[in-house]
Image: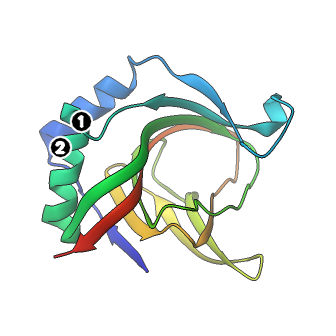
């Protein structure tokens, strides 16, 4: 299942998040199954935050309001800053859902999020600031690329939740 909501946060909260995302300390993140920590094995920079933080609570509240989905337990939350140069399709197991929010990176159809079936791109969602996507973490997905750009996104890896 894939759900898409534009204008996920109200304007004030979104602008606060955008400003906040420009002033946090990001750390390099690497694909966990790879032994070498090189630029080729990185998926960008991440700032990790708690679901119990002010930001986490705001996002949880909006998830209930906009998607009618209650987040009960998470496996992690992060702001990601990436300069995309290639596709890296993957699943986010063992989580059940991802809440993915596009923050900054230019509105463009080919800069969004792609979903795959049998290793082929099957569906894509264009990049648009303040667009949220709630999707099954078992779906194979990847950021989409058509040129080198920096973009900022946010993901909550949901371990337990329910539609209300």
Quarter of image, res 78: top left
Q: Which residue is mark 2?
A: 58
Observer able to see residue 82: yes
Figure quadrant of the N terminus: bottom left
Image coordinates of residue 43 in percent, x first then y, are 67, 40
Q: Which mark is residue 55?
A: 1
Image coordinates of residue 50 in percent, x first then y, are 32, 35
23 shown above or below 114: above
Q: Which residue appears at 22% of the width and 30% of the height?
A: 16
Image coordinates of residue 19 in percent, x first then y, are 30, 25
Quarter of image, res 121: bottom right
Q: Nearer the viewer, residue 58 or 102?
A: 58
Q: Which residue appears at 17% of the width and 43% of the height?
A: 58
145 shown above or below 136: above
Classify mark 1: residues with Cα within 10 Å, few (<14), some (14-19) or many (20+).
some
Q: Which mark is residue 90?
A: none
130 shown above or below 104: below
Q: Nearer the viewer, residue 141 or 113?
A: 141
Are the residues tagged 1 and 2 within 8 Å (C-beta)? yes
- For the residues labelled 1 and 2, the Cα–Cα distance comes to 5 Å
């Amino acid at each position: 299942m894939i759900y898409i909501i534009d204008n996920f946060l109200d304007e004030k909260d979104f602008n606060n998040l955008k400003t906040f995302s420009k002033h946090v300390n990001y750390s390099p993140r690497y694909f966990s199954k790879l032994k070498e920590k090189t630029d080729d094995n990185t998926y960008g920079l991440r700032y990790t935050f708690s679901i119990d933080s002010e930001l986490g609570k705001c996002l949880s509240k909006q998830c209930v309001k906009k998607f009618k989905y209650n987040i009960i337990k998470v496996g992690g939350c992060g702001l990601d800053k990436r300069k995309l140069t290639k596709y890296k399709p993957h699943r986010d197991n063992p989580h059940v859902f991802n809440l993915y929010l596009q923050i900054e990176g230019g509105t463009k159809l080919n800069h969004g999020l792609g979903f795959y079936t049998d290793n082929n791109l099957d569906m894509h969602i264009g990049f648009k600031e303040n667009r949220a996507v709630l999707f099954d973490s078992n779906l194979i997905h990847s950021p989409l690329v058509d040129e080198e750009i920096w973009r900022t996104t946010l993901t909550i890896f949901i371990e337990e939740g329910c539609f209300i």
